[in-house]
Amino acid sequence: MGQSCSRDHYICEEFLLISIPQQRLNPTLEILSKAGGTSSASIFPLPDLKVGTLDSLFSVSDDLVRLERSAEGTLKSMLGYENNFEKLYLRNTLEMKNSVMYFHWDHAKYPNKQAIKEIADIIEKQLLRAELDIKKQGMAYQEVKTNLKQLEVKASDSLVAKDWDEILNPEDFKLDSDHFKVVPVLVPKLSKKDFLAMYTTFASMVVPESAVLLDEDKQHCLYKVTMFKTNVDEFKTKAVEHKFIVREFNPSTKNAKQEIREQLQSEEAKLQRQFIRWLSINFREVFGAYLHVKALRVFVESVLRYGLPLSFKSIFIEPRKGAERKVMTLLNRLFADLDTDDGPIEHNGDVGIMTMIKTHNLDEYYKYVFMKIQTNFRN
């Protein structure tokens, strides 16, 4: 596997991935092992792939750039959920680093005997399935979480907004008689004295001194009042005229709502466990697909740059924190001699191959094949 530099515990947010002529491999690894700006540098193994024609390489190069962006978008979607599960995020961050450092081509998933375009199509379908699954799994989890949150918000609101079934105790509304009924009444605090002085006049059969304070907040008091069942409607009408709020209370409803809450809590915990497990497994799968796209891109751009027969090697480099510019300066100096006006592949046109590469899908041009492997998809 060649030489490799020492490893440390800093979690790099992006690795550097380069491809250079094979004869430069060992000297480059030797220099990088002694450079102060790198934590690790080692071979990034590439498979033997079908080269195809020059035109097909340029065409698939465009496809791979789009596929890479799609993979990064899927990973960002997944980490958008993982922000809620910090331990999972940290674990996957470490796994990303290990996946880069110990990358190997998965021949079972992506047979290297197929054309590069066909391999790219396999990865594209994999990413599409993952994106659809993210939406499906995420929506199911968020729906239960939202429903539970709505119940919790209601429980924390003022007495006016609260669901009284959530705060009233069924024991306070039990009576031994079939003729009487206890009803809850919400009274503004400023009208508390008026209510206590007049509530028995709201209907002919209200039990005197039956008003009992059950709960209160800064603006309202919640009472219970006992009366004959036949007088409940009359009492409600009169209470409303004085801006008091009367609601029916059914203990069985309270029990049902409590069961709903407990069911939602249980369902949320279950879905969260399933979702975390799903995210953990599928994040590794998608990041693995992302690395295979990088490998395809490096291979294609290396063939375009260095030509046939295939004689190049790829290296991943992990810069130390804050040392990326230093490493880039070193690389640019090491490979300053690689640039030529025309490349090794003949092309039936007036434009040199290196000129085509310089203007093809590159925001910046380097004298060697260069790209970055992201491990920070939170931003």
Image (tube, rainbow, N blue to C red):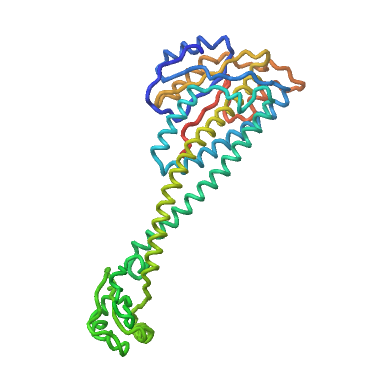
Foreground of the two, 257 or 48: 257
Q: Residue furthest right?
A: 348
Q: Could you tell me which residue is drawn at 72 percent across and 22 percent down?
A: 52
Instruction: Please determine whether, in this image, residue 64 is positioned above or below residue 220.
Output: above
Is 277 on the left-hand or right-hand side of 24?
Answer: left
Foreground of the two, 330 or 39: 39
Residue 171 placement: quadrant:
bottom left
Q: Residue furthest bottom?
A: 204
Q: Could you tell me which residue is drawn at 53 percent across and 20 percent down?
A: 44
> Looking at the picture, how far across and down is residue 346, in whole percent?
73, 17
Is 161 on the left-hand or right-hand side of 129?
Answer: left
Residue 262 placement: quadrant:
bottom left
> Looking at the picture, how far across and down is residue 326, in whole percent?
44, 21
Foreground of the two, 205 or 89: 205
> Looking at the picture, how far across and down is residue 331, in whole percent?
50, 18
Q: How many labels, in total?
A: 0
Instruction: Please determine whether, in this image, residue 248 is positioned above or below residue 146.
Output: below
Residue 61 placement: quadrant:
top right
Is 62 on the left-hand or right-hand side of 179?
Answer: right
> Looking at the picture, how far across and down is residue 243, in whole percent?
34, 81
Q: Could you tell me which residue is drawn at 24 percent across and 76 percent down?
A: 212
Instruction: Please determine whether, in this image, residue 55 is positioned above or below residue 174.
Output: above
